[in-house]
Amino acid sequence: MTTFQVRPPAFEPVGLAAAKAHLRVDGDDEDAVITGLVAAARAHVEAVTRRALAVQGWRCVLGAIPRDGRVRLRPGPVGAVTAVAAFDADGVEVAVPEGDWRLAPAEPDMIVLGRLPAAPNGIEIDFDTGYATAEAAPAPLKQAILMLVAYWFENREAAALGAVAGPAALAFEALVAPFRELRL
């Protein structure tokens, strides 16, 4: 199974004004740098937690249909499945109607595939994921973004490899730890 982003986030969970206030920056000279740091920090927090913090589009590609027909979509939280397609022996895409799959009610990030056409060349599942608004994103994860932005803003050079974890790294880990999804 491979997943990749097909549509970037619709917004940043931490806005420029909030980041500038956290950094105690007045003026507009550093706006482009701060905006870039916010996007990079969000992407890092998303990678660490396997959660999308803002609405974005993703595609899950499977080489075969799972025997039990269940596929956990990541990153979460999944808002909607927008398309399911199967690929026949000739590699031709066959759209799968909505009645042949559903999101599992008890596990909203799980799609259950029902009656599907033969798909010897696999399937693709397109889905929207992430929190609907900046306000809906978890506050600890937004704080982790602000901490990374502040650290990177003050330390613009590359970090030393093997450096001992400092207070900023430990605080970041404490903020994101409850949201990490462990892999088995």
Image (cartoon, helix red, strand yellow):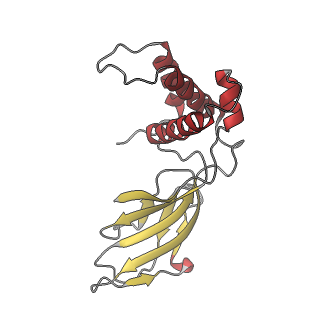
Pick the front one: 145 or 66: 145
Q: In the current view of this chain or complex, which residue is farthest to the front?
A: 29
Image vertical order of residue 89 relative to residue 52, above or below: below
Is residue 40 found left or right of 18 in the rendered image? left
Q: Residue at x 71, y 34 (%)?
A: 17
Is residue 113 found left or right of 141 in the rendered image? left
The quadrant of the rendering that contains the N terminus is bottom left
Is residue 135 found left or right of 143 in the rendered image? right
Q: Residue at x 68, y 21 (%)?
A: 24
Q: Residue at x 37, y 25 (%)?
A: 158
Locate residue 23: give its quadrant. Answer: top right
Pick the front one: 44 or 100: 44
Locate residue 94: give its quadrant. Answer: bottom left
Residue 26 lies, in percent from the top left, at 71, 25
Residue 126 lies, in percent from the top left, at 49, 67
Pick the front one: 89 or 100: 89
Locate residue 103: give its quadrant. Answer: bottom right
The quadrant of the rendering that contains the C terminus is top left
Is residue 169 found left or right of 146 in the rendered image? left
Residue 182 lies, in percent from the top left, at 41, 38
Image vertical order of residue 56 relative to residue 96, above or below: above
Count of numbered circles on the image: 0
Q: Residue at x 51, y 78 (%)?
A: 100
Residue 7 lies, in percent from the top left, at 52, 60
